[in-house]
Amino acid sequence: AGKSALIEFLSMVCHVLMLSALLWRTAEPGFSAYRSASCSARGRPIVSDITHCGRAADWYALHSKRPLHGENRTRPLTSQPPGCYYSNSEQQLYFNPLICTESEQWCRDWIARTYGSCTKDSSCLCECSFMS
């Protein structure tokens, strides 16, 4: 009877710990990665600063954690996604800063004209919250 009660107690502790870990993970902000379309098309905000881009790399445990500025690349911006993205072929994190906020129509138009979409090679890292 004593062994059975101990096993039952340890099982309960395990379930409580798993639930608390799930709740902690759900409350913290997260990121999502896409290989097609764009963050905006999926209803997710673009990672808008270089610090959050590094956090997104940590979130996904990517090889590269320090983003380089995308506009310094030889490829034109029209073939690069806006915000934070990871080049799978180069195993490098890049960040293309925005000069406006996506809530304004002219900004969404500018983003669509200036940048490319997420692709299999350029995975967009978007912001999200599991509570949303």
Image: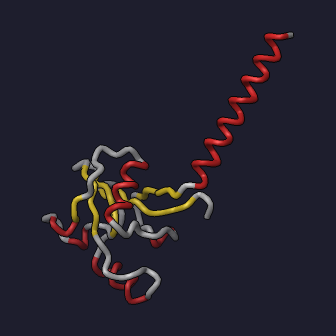
Quarter holding the N terminus?
Answer: top right
Residue positioned 60% across, 55% down in the render: 27
The quadrant in which the C terminus is found is bottom right
Q: Is residue 16 left or right of residue 81?
A: right
Give 65 or 71, whichever is nearer the viewer. Answer: 65
In the orientation shown, which residue stands out farthest toward the bottom? Answer: 106
Residue 56 coordinates in the image, percent (x, y): 40, 55
Q: Please state if 82 lies on the left or on the right of 59 as rendered.
A: left
From the viewer's side, name the closer residue of 2 and 120.
Answer: 2
Q: Position of residue 13 (x, y in %)?
A: 71, 29
Which residue is pictured at 68% across the width and 41% down the height?
A: 19
At 25% across and 48% down in the image, what residue appears?
91
Which picture quadrant has residue 72? bottom left
x, y percentage for residue 131? 62, 60
Q: How is the image coloured?
A: secondary structure
Position of 33 relative to 62 (above/below): below
